[in-house]
């Protein structure tokens, strides 16, 4: 067993979101010398149980091992069957386990990925539950930088308290880029209200949910924005009609992530 190969795989496993708890199993599997082996990982996100199978194989040209992919199964408390996807490991910045979970919940993730030519590019990813490839895999929709989604601009259209603090703002944006559903505070008519938000690159907006996790439509968002403007000044209120959130934000249809189908998903 080559120590350099082991150290590389340990880092790959760790930074793909599986921590350091699999290290002993990884060492044992490599010492066994089989051409292929698997590692098993389990965790929970909220009430959802997440199981992952990490797949490794040995090179045909040497005794080096490679971390090829990981298969994820998400069992939601209110679903009879689990949803399953496979994410492939590339040389660049791979999709982490938590990001995979967020994608499987229909949310979007911002990543720096590496193409086949070795070039790094930035893109928003979202799982397309209506389209599969020839292997039955759900495809990933890509929204590249030239698509024009500006997360900061989308956030600025709403009276979010955390945006007034640079550190909180940066933390909020980082969390949304990882695909998380983020809790925030809306300031409306001098009162604070809890909301949940997620990035929506397709419609260049954010999705907003109330404290009961009910999706708020565009009219509600506009009303809150207008109320906040009126509270600030009559001058700002007079300009409000020119700064409304686009109607397309309201037309975004969030796909049902947990359809009872088993697929695999690759990332190139």
Image (spheres, rainbow, N blue to C red):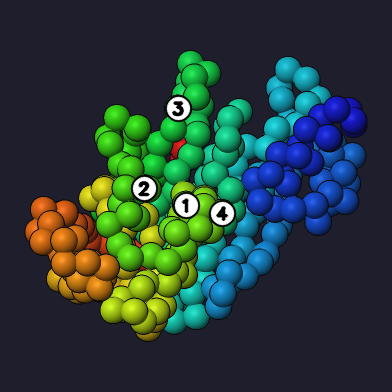
**In the image, which is nearer the foreground, mark 3 or mark 2?**
2
Q: Which residue is mark 1?
A: 173
Which of 221 and 161 lies nearest the eye of the viewer? 161
**Mark number displayed over residue 121:** 3
Element on which disc 3 rests:
strand
| Residue 161, percent from left and from top | 42, 66
Element on which disc 1 rests:
helix
Indicate which disc, 3 or 1, sits on the residue closer to the N terminus: 3
Q: Which residue is mark 4?
A: 167
Evaluate if marks 4 and 1 touch, with contact meaning CB atoms under 8 Å apart: no
The picture quadrant where one finds residue 142 is top left
Indicate which disc, 3 or 2, sits on the residue closer to the N terminus: 3
Give the residue drawn at x 84%, y 35%: 6
Distance in Å between CA atoms under marks 3 and 2: 17 Å
**Apparent side of residue 35 relative to residue 100 in the rendered image (left or right):** right
Quarter holding the N terminus is top right
**In the image, which is nearer the foreground, mark 4 or mark 1?**
4
Q: How many C-alpha atoms fall within 10 Å of the one at disc 3: few (<14), some, or many (≥20)?
A: few
Indicate which disc, 2 or 4, sits on the residue closer to the N terminus: 2
Element on which disc 2 rests:
helix
Which of 228 and 35 lies nearest the eye of the viewer? 228
Evaluate if marks 2 and 1 touch, with contact meaning CB atoms under 8 Å apart: yes
Evaluate if marks 3 and 2 touch, with contact meaning CB atoms under 8 Å apart: no
Indicate which disc, 4 or 3, sits on the residue closer to the N terminus: 3
């Amino acid at each position: 067993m080559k120590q350099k190969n082991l150290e590389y795989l340990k880092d790959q496993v760790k930074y793909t979101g599986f921590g350091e708890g699999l290290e002993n199993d990884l060492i044992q599997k490599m010492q066994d010398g089989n051409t292929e082996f698997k590692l098993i990982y389990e965790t929970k996100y909220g009430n959802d149980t997440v199981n992952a199978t990490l797949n490794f194989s040995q090179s045909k040209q040497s005794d080096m091992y490679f971390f090829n992919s990981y298969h994820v199964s998400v069992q939601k408390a209110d679903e009879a069957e689990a949803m399953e996807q496979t994410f492939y490991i590339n040389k660049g910045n791979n999709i982490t386990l938590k990001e995979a979970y967020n994608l499987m919940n229909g949310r979007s993730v911002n990543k720096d990925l590496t193409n086949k030519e070795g070039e790094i590019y930035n893109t928003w990813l979202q799982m397309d539950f209506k389209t599969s490839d020839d292997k039955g895999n759900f495809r990933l929709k890509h929204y590249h930088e030239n698509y024009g989604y500006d997360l900061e601009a989308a956030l600025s259209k709403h009276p979010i308290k955390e945006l007034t603090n640079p550190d909180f703002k940066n933390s909020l944006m980082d969390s949304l880029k990882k695909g998380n559903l983020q809790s925030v505070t809306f300031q409306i008519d001098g009162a604070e209200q809890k909301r949940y938000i997620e990035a929506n690159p397709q419609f260049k907006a954010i999705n907003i949910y109330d404290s009961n996790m009910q999706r708020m439509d565009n009219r509600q968002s506009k009303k809150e924005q207008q109320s906040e403007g009126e509270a600030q000044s009559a001058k700002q209120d007079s300009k409000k009609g020119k700064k409304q959130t686009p109607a397309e934000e309201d037309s975004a249809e969030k796909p049902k992530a947990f359809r009872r189908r088993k697929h695999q998903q690759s990332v190139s």
